[in-house]
Image (cartoon, rainbow, N blue to C red):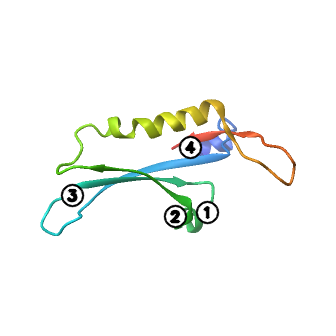
Amino acid sequence: DFLSAILDGDIKPDIVVMVFLDGAQLYQSKESDCWIYVWVLLNMSPDKCYKKINVIPGGFILGPNKPKNVDSFLFPSLHHVSALQREGLMILDASHHDDPAHETVFW
C-alpha cells in the first residue's frame, strides 16, 4: 500500500517515522510494569534505520499494570507529528543555502 502510493506519486515523503510500543519486565518476579515507545526513522535502508542513532526514544508509561488507554499516553507525541505533517520540518541544507520545509509521513 505505502510503497505503491509512493511509486504512483500520491505520497512524496521526505521523512517517514514509525512508532513502536512494547512492555518491559523490570523485575524478574513482576509482570511487565513499564511500557516504552520509540520512533524509528525509515528513510534509510533496514541495516541503518534500526541503528541506535536513528531510533528516537518517545517515552515511558509506568505503572503496575499495562495501560488501559494507550492513546492517552501517545497523544502528545502524535500531536507533535501531526503538527510536523501540517507545517513541515525546517531542515537547513547547507549545500544549497536554503532551509526548505520537509514533509513528514507517519507510518
Residue bearing the label numbered 4: 2
The tag on residue 45 is 1
Q: Name the kind of residue labelled 4 in the image.
A: Phe
The tag on residue 50 is 2
Check the image and name the residue furthest to the left.
Answer: 29
Camera-near label (4 vs 3) is 3
Nearer the observer, 95 or 45: 95
Dot 4: few (<14), some (14–19), or many (≥20) neighbours within 10 Å? few
Residue 46 x/y as whole percent: 56, 64
User: Looking at the image, is mark 2 or mark 4 earlier in the sequence?
Assistant: 4
- Badges 1 and 2: C-beta atoms under 8 Å apart? no
Q: Secondary structure at mark 1?
A: loop
User: Looking at the image, is mark 1 or mark 2 earlier in the sequence?
Assistant: 1
Q: Is residue 64 left or right of residue 87?
A: left
Q: Name the kind of residue labelled 1 in the image.
A: Ser
Q: CA distance from mark 2 to mark 4?
A: 19 Å
Camera-near label (2 vs 3) is 3
Q: Is residue 21 left or right of residue 83?
A: left
Q: Secondary structure at mark 4?
A: helix
Q: CA distance from mark 3 to mark 1?
A: 32 Å
> How many marks overall?
4
Q: Is residue 87 left or right of residue 25?
A: right
Dot 2: few (<14), some (14–19), or many (≥20) neighbours within 10 Å? some
Q: Secondary structure at mark 3?
A: loop
